[in-house]
Amino acid sequence: MQCIHRIGTHAIQNEIEENPQMLLTNTKGSFFYWQENRSSRYHGFFVRENGVMLKTIAGLRLGVRLPVKRVTNKFSSFEIERQGGLRELFFLDPTSNSLVWQSNEVITLSVLLDGKEMFDNSDMGRFYEVTAEEGCVVVEFVKREDGSLGRRFFLAIAGVGGSRTKKEWVQEKYEWDATRNDPPFDRYVFWASDLQGKKFVFSVAQEKGAAIETAKRVYEDAEKIKKSLDAEVEWFAQKYDRPIGDEEICTAYLAAKYSLRHMEVKDEWKNSEGLYAGIPWFTQFWLRDFTIASRQLSPRVAHAIYMRYLDQWIMYGSLHGQDAPGTLAYADTEGLFFRCAEQLNRMGVLQGEDARKTKELLISFLNNTLPARMHNGLVQNGSKETWMDTEYQGSGRAGARIEIQALTLAMFRLAGTLTNDKAYLLREAELLRAVREVFWDGDALADGAGDSTQRPNIFLAYQFYPDLLLNHEWEKAFARALDELWLSWGGVASIAKSHPFFCGVDRGCKEKNQSYHHGDAWFFINNYVALSLCKVNEEKFRPFIDALLATSTNDIVWRGILGHHSEISSADEFAPSGCLAQSWSAASYCDALDQVLQSKNII
């Protein structure tokens, strides 16, 4: 099968063997996740209503079986060309929960539905009613459990030349979910209708009238909407194009930037509400993922999302790393928050009252909260409180961890800069001395106090606080880490390959989550490794940098979801998996390429 990416003046193509996957998003938080032969219950059309992700359409199936010959990613849309010349075009309306499907021929299209909240896999109490109203096919979905009304929404379909109501339940098998050991592996979906036509609009709303009105409006404005989306992509390509020279890398760079841009969700007033951590199943707003991605967001968007977290801290008296206050504790939350603040301050967008509030919170945290987390001169965290938040046989990284110390050092430095109080610089110096004494033995930088296991968190520590070691010491530490973590296909394992807990296949060990932080290569880490190596000694580490960026580029343009950057890969082989469109993967890829281009005086 041929795959093509087109953006701006760039076009690349390649033959791919896999069953391709495509993704469309809009700023309302809706997404359409397509695969010809659906292998997961996460494929389909999902909409965000009042902060809840709802699955609506399971799939759209042609009435005649025609193999796919070519898939073209146009970024704001995608086109499927089949044997015999039939072409399908998909795009989302940016201002409503509407999916547009177009074809160059009149054809029959079967509509399969799976109304539910994203993670609700119960198959009981699902009711559909299919009617024809105001020129649309209208489906009412209601979920009832124990006699009470649960979730409800309406789907209106405009553009129907002819239709035949089916009202049948059909079973779908989900091979990808089975491979991931993520049950259920099959599910009955509702075959609502067979439609005839060349263009359909599928609109979802809580009220029937709103769904019908929206579907009819988007149908009438479809060409205008498509032209506007194309113009936005053209503008985007011109703004972010770089003279890279390699067409694959250039396209991957633009794809990663575009992917990240369209992870932003706006509220009904078109203000930035948050950044999805990933699609399909990480459609939440997590501070950690946002702060790591924030450098690649526009200053306006980064500042708006930052202010939501700032207001949350002031309102609730603490900062949580998830959508709303909860019980989970994260050891890196405050450090990453203030790292983002430092970046915004450097860009000149954190000023006035916002800057004053930030400084007050920083001082309060360092003076009142941090001391309770200190033990033997180092910052301590509990099990599963770092980004490596799974454990296997008690390996949850409790204790003093290297990247947490680095973030704390950076907070002391920021406090000294903002207040001109030398007491914070003295505390920084004391912690630095303690960290070097405990973590650095002159050859290797330990992952934790009393834990010399090599993990890639030392590269995060470098990103957060590069003055932890001298440059020649970082060279030595990185070389030692690569000896134990390097994967021959061009990645870095999440734990030393010689460690007894190491698992080389994603979800392939006795406990399905064992590999997650005990083997799997994380693309955001791979990209940060490349960035760190480039800063410390680009010439010495050139083979590693090239290999790391090559695998990330390959993932973005030819693997996983085409045009997006995956979460992880198995360690034993290059096999992108996990959440296949991940914000911090895309952002860190752009960070790494920006550094490479800067070192070559291209930007």
Image (spheres, grey):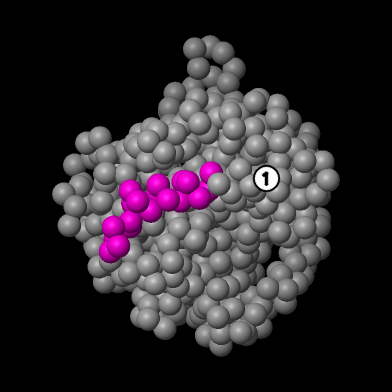
* Quarter of the figure with the N terminus: bottom left
The magenta stretch spans residue 571: no
Residue 215 visible? The answer is no
Count of picture labels: 1
Residue 295 image point, x, y percent: 63, 59
Taking the image as shown, residue 170 lies to the left or right of residue 410, namely: left
Secondary structure of the residue carrying tag 1 is loop
Residue carrying label 1: 421
* Quarter of the figure with the C terminus: bottom right
Residue 392 visible? The answer is yes
Q: Nearer the viewer, residue 239 or 184?
A: 239
Q: Residue at x 54, y 19 (%)?
A: 144
Q: Main secondary structure of the magenta part?
A: helix
Magenta range is 427-445
Q: Nearer the viewer, residue 432 or 304?
A: 432
Q: Residue at x 38, y 78 (%)?
A: 541
Residue 345 image point, x, y percent: 72, 54
